[in-house]
Amino acid sequence: MTWLESAKSVVASEYFDFVDGLSDDLQVGEIVVIYSWSNVEERNEINEVELYLPSYMAIGNDSGDDEFLIRRDGSLDVYQCDAGAFGSVEPEKIHSNFEIWIGEGCPIPDNIDTNAIPLQSSIWLIRAPENQLRGMFELRKILGQSWPASEMKSMIDSMPSKLVQDGHPFAVSRKLEGKADYLACIGYGDSAELVVPLTSKS
């Protein structure tokens, strides 16, 4: 019996039916990624889930360090745990039904490993990128925006300037990991007077 065949026999059929229909990993919102069935084995091997959490199987991640898991007992409960802490802490239950969790857009608690960075708030430019306009093109790509060059120049000239009205600061902080120069340019907050630099929480 292969790893996938063995896993299929112990996980909830509702979960399997959903992911078996995915051609590739599924991104839900700005943060959550659900692994397709074809990628589940590789993801679990990389994180050594079977070694450290033999009763669980990783089913996705938060675009960062945390993995989402279900138990190998046919239940639909969804759990979350820092992959670096596998084996040292028990995964935290975040939802009692995988199907409903998916239908709700995969919400995750604000108090789990978000380092006090809110999941949703306006995104602001608080410092010009090192390469000025060239750097703005990179930020535009990272944030999935389509600002014209003239607007990006105006953003640099009038900081703090709002980049995204209803943005996802936590997701942005994940995307900018390892890119300290760009991370230092970004803040979040409901108004220009209340902007908090992302670097203050990372």
Image (cartoon, rainbow, N blue to C red):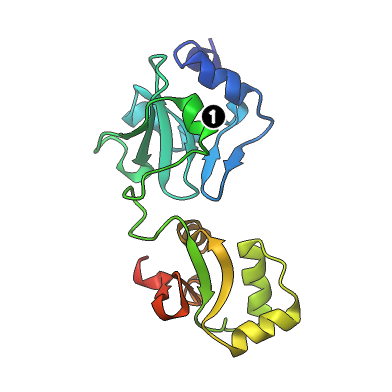
Q: Using the rendered image of the protein, determine whether residue 152 is visible from the camera's viewpoint.
A: yes
Q: Which quadrant does the C terminus fall into?
A: bottom left
201 sits to left or right of 165: left
Height in image: 187 above or below 158? above
Task: Report the amino acid beneath label 1.
Answer: Val
Q: How many marks?
A: 1
Residue 85 lies, in percent from the top left, at 30, 42
The residue depicted at 42 percent of the width and 75 percent of the height is 195
User: Label 1 crowding class (10 Å Cα cut-off): few <14, some 14-19, many 20+?
Assistant: many
Query: Visible in this render: residue 132?
Result: no
- Residue 104: % across, % down: 51, 36
Residue 82 locus on image (x, y percent) = 35, 44
Decide which of 152, 65 is in the foreground and name it.
152
Q: Residue at x 57, y 84 (%)?
A: 130
Q: Secondary structure at mark 1?
A: helix
Q: Is residue 12 above or below residue 47?
A: above
Left or right: 200 as drawn, with respect to 35? left
* Residue at the image point whose x is 50% and y is 25% from the top: 99
**Could you say which is closer to the camera, residue 159 or residue 66?**
159
Q: Hey, which residue is sitting farthest bottom in the picture?
A: 157
Residue position for label 1: 40
Residue at left offset 47%, top offset 32%: 101
